[in-house]
Amino acid sequence: MGDAPFLVSSAFPFLDIDGEKIKFFPKPLMEPERHELETAKKLRKVRYVEETIFKKWVQKGEGVISTNMSKYQLNDRMLFLKDHDVDFKFDASTVPRNTINRVTNASENIFYSSGVSMKGLGLFFLVRFMEDNYKEILEGSMRYLEDRGFGGDISIGKGQFTHEVSDEDITLAMGKNFVTLSRYIPTSEEIQAMGDEMWYELGSKRGRGSDGILRKKVKFFQEGSTFRTLEREIYGQVAESAAEAVEYGLAYPVGFD
């Protein structure tokens, strides 16, 4: 992969508690450690962890979390400090839909669509700029999406949002390893260089174009997967899934030893 003007993380949840945004990141996938049965069960259920927990986890290992589980609470697969008094819900839902015959005004073709509903939560993502002149372009794109909406069913009011921009990043210096905060599609050269020094979960995506034709299935490493650091700034590649469609696969690396 050549130079990239910026890197983008996946979107993760945050809680807004009295004006303070508590950000969550994917559970780091690292070499597993031995735990008591109940602790192991809880850790398997975790999908996202509060930022302070995430930093401890990647810097000091899973053990520093597992031996202090009494400090944390687990709710909707999100692990966070017990002193947060929160009320939130994160659900996948299936909604019945139908089409309207524009001539007879009759309801036809009942079908179902799926989506995610959130209460007391928001989403955020990180952008790491290598070329500052792209900041204005990206901010303009976000304003456009805010007006238009994003995702499916925007014609019926879904995908509406408001956004804020802040100048911050998760500050962990690059070390011997890194955890990716985005889906990662490595090159064959990167896989060979890393060898067996990786802990990961695999995912795949097969989209469908506006013409209804299925696109090529693309496989990737999931967010939270960890790898050995190589001497490069950019990891991964953008994979073509159709003639005019691609899947983003550049890692958003956060380093640790």
Image (spheres, helix red, strand yellow):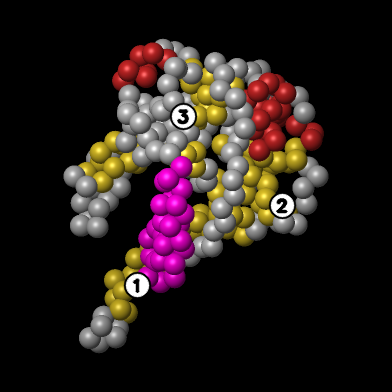
Q: Closer to the camera, 238 or 7? A: 7
Residue 120: percent from left, percent from top: 65, 58
Residue 177: percent from left, percent from top: 53, 19
Question: Which residue is at 32% across, 28% downward?
Answer: 1
Q: Which residue is mark 2?
A: 20
Q: Is residue 213 left or right of residue 86?
A: left
Give the extent of the magenta segment.
132-157
Question: Which residue is at 66% across, 38% downward?
Answer: 51
Is 69 situated above or below 20?
above
Q: Which residue is mark 3?
A: 201
Magenta stretch: includes residue 20: no
Q: Which residue is mark 1?
A: 98
Q: What amino acid type is highlighted by mark number 1?
A: Asn
Give the label, 3 or 1, closer to the camera.
3
Q: Tell me whether circle 3 and circle 1 mark residues in contact (CB < 8 Å).
A: no
Q: What amino acid type is highlighted by mark number 2?
A: Glu
Q: What amino acid type is highlighted by mark number 3?
A: Glu
Does label 2 or label 1 sit earlier along the sequence? 2
Name the residue at the bottom extreme. Answer: 104
Question: Which residue is at 48% across, 33% downward?
Answer: 252
Quadrant in the picture for residue 80: top right
Does label 3 or label 2 sit earlier along the sequence? 2
Quadrant in the picture for residue 96: bottom left
Q: Secondary structure at mark 2?
A: strand
Classify mark 3: residues with Cα within 10 Å, few (<14), some (14-19) or many (20+): few
Q: Secondary structure at mark 3?
A: loop
Give the label, 2 or 1, closer to the camera.
2
Q: Secondary structure at mark 1?
A: strand
- Cα distance in 3D space between marks 3 and 1: 37 Å
Name the residue at the front extreme. Answer: 133
Residue 163: percent from left, percent from top: 54, 58
